[in-house]
Amino acid sequence: MTKAEIIAEISTKTGLEKVDVQETVEAFFKVVKNAMIGGENVYVRGFGSFVVKKRAEKTARNISKNTAIIIPEHFVPSFKPAKVFVEKVKTGNKAKK
């Protein structure tokens, strides 16, 4: 499902204009991105958590040049689904098969 499909479905279910729904969805993603860029985690109860994870410094290999490369510590975005959400997906997929 794409962002456009999500916007269309929300628009039909709520009766709001697609333009208004698109602005709301874009604003939501912007808030989540800015919070994570600032090092904050975002928790949506019943859905999941958008978490910033720290990756430690490590040594990697450049195979073509046969040299060692040091990758500095860095942060990556991650999503951890809520237990309730995971259970609903598990039981929902069984019903469709």
Image: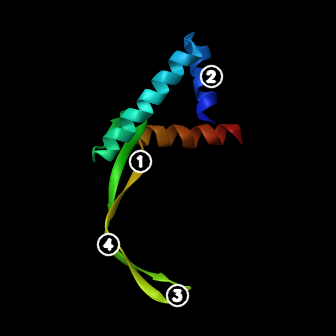
> How many angstroms separate mark 1 from mark 4 (CA)?
23 Å
| Camera-nearest label, 4 or 3 | 3
x, y percent for residue 40: 28, 44
Whichever of labels 3 and 2 marks the residue nearer the N terminus, that label is 2
Residue pointed to by mark 1: 80
- Asked if the residue under mark 4 is in contact with the one under mark 2, i.e. CB atoms within 8 Å, the reply is no
| Camera-nearest label, 3 or 2 | 3
Q: Residues within 10 Å of mark 3 (few under 14, many from 20)?
A: few
> How many angstroms separate mark 3 from mark 2 (CA)?
50 Å
x, y percent for residue 84: 44, 38
Q: Residue furthest bottom?
A: 66
> What type is the residue that disc 1 sits on?
Lys
Residue pointed to by mark 3: 65
Provide the secondary structure element on which disc 1 rests: strand
> What type is the residue that disc 2 sits on?
Ala
Closer to the camera in the image, 54 or 27: 27
Residue pointed to by mark 2: 8
Whichever of labels 3 and 1 marks the residue nearer the N terminus, that label is 3
Q: Is residue 34 above or below residue 28?
A: below
Q: Residues within 10 Å of mark 2 (few under 14, many from 20)?
A: some
- Quarter holding residue 28: top left
Q: Is residue 75 above or below residue 73?
A: above
Residue 57, numbered circle: 4
> How many angstroms separate mark 3 from mark 1 (CA)?
37 Å
Residue at figure coordinates x 53%, y 23% from the top left: 22
> What type is the residue that disc 3 sits on?
Lys
Residue at figure coordinates x 33%, y 62% from the top left: 74
Give the position of the N terminus as an image quadrant: top right
> What type is the residue that disc 4 sits on?
Glu
- Asked if the residue under mark 2 is in contact with the one under mark 3, i.e. CB atoms within 8 Å, the reply is no
